Amino acid sequence: MSESTTLVTIIAAAPREIYEAWLDSAGHSRMTGSHAIINPVVGGKFSAWDGYIEGTTLELQPYSRIVQAWRTSEFPPESKDSHLEILLKEVGEDKTEITVVHTEIPDGQAAEYRQGWEDYYFKPMLEYFGDE
């Protein structure tokens, strides 16, 4: 079995700005406040939070959708990668609704990762880009 979680927030930036920052090593590092290395192509590998998170980009739809195979160093070795979908929707001038759909999380870890998305992505992104 696996678990899933979905989170939504509004960021005061255009979808293009968020998309480009997410897929750029320096931009991702600035946006989250922690070191990231990202190869921004389909099939490209990435790591974030000093190697705590790693994975592969599976799909890219410029400025609207990023799909990644994703895991942390806390995943049991036998666990397959989880599935991450980032959806960006313009909801006003320089405002984006960002939806994180994180599925196939190992049993018992979804609440922890949900809190992690809030603490280590949404909060720093709101500070970096501003909120609505």
Image (tube, helix red, strand yellow):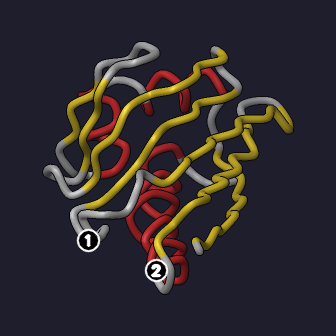
Identify the residue at image location x=51%, y=69%.
118
Mark 2 element type: loop
- What amino acid does circle 2 point to? Gln
Which label is found at residue 122? none
Q: Position of residue 33 (x, y in %)?
A: 26, 52
Give residue 1's quadrant in the image: bottom right
Identify the residue at image location x=70%, y=50%.
99
Identify the residue at image location x=59%, y=57%.
102
Give the labeled residue for mark 1: 74
Of the pair 104 and 41, the residue shown nearer to us: 104
Q: Is residue 127 above or below residue 69?
A: below
Of the pair 81 and 38, the residue shown nearer to us: 81
* Alpha carbons under labels 2 and 1: distance apart: 9 Å
Q: Position of residue 21 (x, y in %)?
A: 43, 29
- What amino acid does circle 1 point to? Glu
Which label is found at residue 109? 2
